């Protein structure tokens, strides 16, 4: 018996020693975490200096909130409000702001508890409060009506705002938005939930570790949100990591993580009549594509655009394509007016000419092939009026030939006997953009949004033509989309 007691005593000592070692390792681990990963708040002034811009305004709203906002672009144009998602900031819209600013007044803001706005005194970070902030910004800027777009939780804010103020909203865009009842999703077979989400899901752990979030954890979360890992840059990770350390912001993150993203305004959204576009990354790991179908069921008049191989934030992952799609949607609602001073002149002539379809692949729809884009001289472009224009000619139009028709020889070469023209309902030719919306008989609607190599055309004037590509953009004819439609330049005879 004494021997057994001695053996138990030895074993107990071993167990206690093991527990002591484990406890010691745990303490060391926590100490190491504190030494290597502790990330204190960054002073507001330091963050404003680094992440503010010349366009940044810090405005005291009627409710007493001081909000960081930017009012950019064309002040005489229709306003577009862009609303960011949870734990993001107005910076997420940077590429869209740059793209849209030429033809739209673009307003972005950091919602309460985000970005350089930071926490509020009353701790209200609900969806209705966020929608109220959007309205306060509208009132402050004295903007009568607006287009609104929102991503993720910002989509829910945009939906709530639109339901509350339908008389103010010209159109709504929902990008990978929450706000609708969550659809039944398939289980994640890999169970691959980013560690930062697992930590924040536990309130005790989250409160303990909220000051120990590292750049690597931020990167892991962003990689889960983006389908293309190259879109997650070091600069982006640094911005999220540092802005998230705005004094008091981490406490607001924990508060919002326990709030529902479903909004009571989803059911009333069925009564909305303004134009709506739903834009979704098909590889969204955070908000399933099925949610887009839920929005479309509620608003069947909406347009749906999905992006294969794209994740939760199309405006950052594919900024040019998503912004082009959005601008084409806006153009159909509020046409861009021709800009009289935007065409570049050389020796008294505008960039008149035939922009011939170029590139390795034909712009073909069945038997129809795009031959060229015609742009007339500046005087005719500026004088164009859709109400009085002819039904066979416009100063900006697409020539499309029917390759099933007979080939006819001419003085300067041959051509197909039959064809059709894409005539505009609106267009804009600026110093670096070509925007076109119209239609062609037999083929339906045509939209084009392209970038313009002005220097390439000017250089080609000396020889009368160039084989180099001078316009590249997204062309859609009916249901057929050409993502990189390219055109060279020919002066004509």
Image (spheres, rainbow, N blue to C red):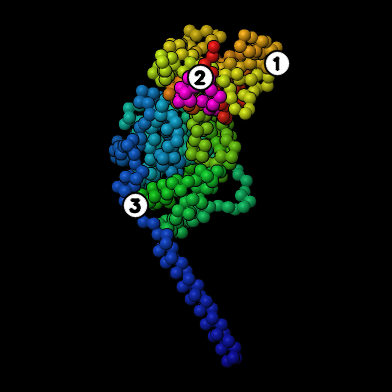
Residue at the image position 57 percent from the left and 85 percent from the top:
8
In this rendered view, identify the residue nearer to me: 116 or 94.
94
Q: In which quadrant will I find the C terminus? A: top right
Q: Which residues make up the magenta segment?
A: 454-475
What is the C-alpha distance between the residues marked 2 and 3? Answer: 59 Å
Q: Which residue is mark 3?
A: 42
Q: Nearer the viewer, mark 2 or mark 1?
A: 2
Q: Which residue is mark 2?
A: 463
Q: Which residue is mark 1?
A: 404
Marks 2,3: beta carbons within 8 A: no
Residue at the image position 52 percent from the left and 41 percent from the top:
312
In this rendered view, identify the residue nearer to me: 75 or 452.
452
Q: Residues within 10 Å of mark 3 (few under 14, many from 20)?
A: some
Residue 236 drawn at (x, y percent): 45, 45
14 part of magenta stretch: no
Mark 2 element type? loop
Residue at the image position 60 percent from the left and 53 percent from the top:
191
Q: Nearer the viewer, mark 2 or mark 3?
A: 2
Q: Residues within 10 Å of mark 2 (few under 14, many from 20)?
A: few
Residue at the image position 52 percent from the left and 48 percent from the top:
223
Quadrant in the rendering for residue 88:
top left
Q: Is residue 252 visible?
A: no
Residue 4 - label? none
Question: Of the residues under marks 2 and 3, which one precedes in the sequence?
Answer: 3
């Amino acid at each position: 018996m004494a021997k057994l007691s001695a053996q138990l005593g030895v074993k107990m000592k071993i167990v206690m020693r093991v527990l002591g070692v484990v406890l010691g390792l745990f303490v060391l681990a926590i100490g190491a975490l504190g030494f290597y990963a502790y990330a204190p708040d960054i002073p507001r002034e330091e963050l404003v200096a680094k992440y503010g811009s010349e366009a940044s305004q810090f405005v005291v709203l009627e409710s007493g909130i001081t909000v960081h906002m930017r009012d950019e672009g064309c002040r005489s144009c229709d306003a577009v409000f862009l609303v960011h998602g949870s734990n993001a900031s107005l910076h997420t819209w940077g590429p869209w702001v740059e793209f849209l600013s030429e033809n739209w007044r673009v307003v972005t803001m950091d919602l309460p508890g985000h970005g350089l706005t930071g926490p509020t005194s009353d701790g209200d970070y609900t969806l209705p409060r966020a929608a109220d902030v959007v309205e306060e910004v509208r009132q402050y800027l004295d903007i009568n009506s607006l287009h609104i777009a929102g991503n993720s939780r910002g989509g829910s804010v945009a939906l709530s705002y639109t339901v509350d103020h339908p008389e103010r909203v010209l159109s709504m865009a929902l990008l990978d938005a929450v706000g609708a009842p969550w659809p039944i999703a398939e289980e994640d077979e890999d169970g691959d939930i980013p560690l930062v989400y697992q930590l924040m899901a536990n309130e005790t752990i989250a409160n303990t570790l909220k000051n120990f979030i590292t750049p690597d954890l931020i990167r892991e979360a962003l990689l889960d949100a983006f389908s293309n890992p190259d879109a997650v840059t070091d600069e982006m990770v640094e911005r999220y990591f540092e802005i998230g350390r705005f004094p008091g912001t981490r406490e607001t993150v924990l508060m919002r993580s326990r709030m529902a993203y479903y909004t009571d305004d989803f059911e009333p959204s069925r009564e909305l009549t303004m134009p709506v576009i739903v834009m979704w990354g098909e590889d969204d790991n955070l908000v399933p594509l099925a949610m887009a179908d839920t929005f479309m069921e509620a608003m069947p008049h909406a347009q749906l655009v999905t992006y294969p191989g794209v994740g939760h934030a199309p405006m950052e992952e594919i900024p040019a394509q998503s912004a082009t799609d959005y601008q084409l949607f806006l153009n159909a609602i509020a046409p861009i007016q021709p800009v009289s001073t935007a065409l570049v002149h050389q020796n008294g002539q505008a960039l008149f000419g035939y922009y011939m379809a170029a590139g390795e692949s034909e712009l073909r729809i069945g038997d129809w092939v795009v031959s060229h884009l015609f742009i007339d001289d500046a005087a005719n472009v500026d004088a164009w009026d859709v109400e009085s224009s002819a039904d066979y000619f416009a100063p900006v139009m697409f020539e499309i030939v029917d390759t099933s028709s007979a080939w006819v020889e001419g003085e300067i070469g041959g051509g197909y006997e039959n064809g059709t023209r894409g005539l505009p309902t609106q267009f804009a030719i600026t110093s670096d953009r070509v925007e076109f919306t119209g239609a062609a008989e037999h083929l339906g609607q045509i939209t084009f949004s392209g970038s313009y190599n002005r220097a390439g055309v000017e250089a080609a004037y000396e020889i009368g033509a160039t084989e180099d590509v001078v316009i590249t953009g997204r062309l859609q004819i009916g249901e057929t989309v050409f993502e990189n439609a390219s055109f060279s330049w020919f002066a004509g005879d």
